[in-house]
Image (cartoon, helix red, strand yellow):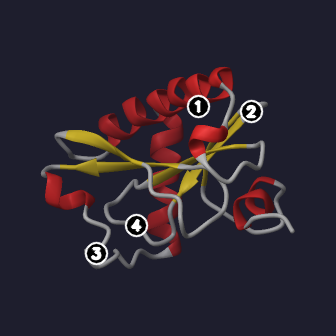
Amino acid sequence: MPSIFTKIINGEIPCYKIAEDDRYFAFLDINPLAKGHTLVVPKQETDYLFDLDDDLLAGMNVFAKKIAVAQKKVIDCKRVGVAVLGLEVPHAHIHLIPMNSEADVNFRNPKLQLSKEEFEDIAKRIKENL
């Protein structure tokens, strides 16, 4: 059975897409810790990040870097944090989270409640800065 991320990649579930190429897909987290919180996933459905072959894993980090640079231009933050957790969805993924302190990357923090318009605006601005 395809993961929820595979369904998003295939267009079966809507998302706020940031970027896509032949191997990777990036979209806004709908339960963000911060404005601009983005998920980067390989299109290849693999459960565990470190089960990806070296080339795919390395390329995923380069793809994520482009997103992080664009996020930093759009979101007022000191850095873009990177988190790899991956237990809730059996599909390798990287969280890119705009942050001003380490506390901003605590997944126990309350999630932001953003409107559709806010998500659309954030996605548009990040895409414009890629």
Q: Is residue 117 above or below residue 24?
A: below
**Badge 4, how many Cα within 10 Å: few under 14, some, many 20+?**
many
Name the residue tied to disc 2: 23
Cα distance in 3D space between marks 3 and 1 = 26 Å
Q: Quick check: marks 4 and 3 in contact, CB under 8 Å?
A: no
Name the residue tied to disc 1: 60
x 12%, y 51%: residue: 101
Q: Position of residue 120 (x, y in %)?
A: 53, 60
Q: Position of residue 71 (x, y in %)?
A: 38, 40
Identify which amino acid the numbered label 4 is placed on. Answer: Pro
Name the residue tied to disc 4: 32
Cα distance in 3D space between marks 2 and 3 = 31 Å
Name the residue tied to disc 3: 108
Which of the two marks, 4 or 1, is nearer to us in this view? Answer: 1
Q: Position of residue 2 (x, y in %)?
A: 83, 64
Asked which quadrant contains residue 59, the reply is top right
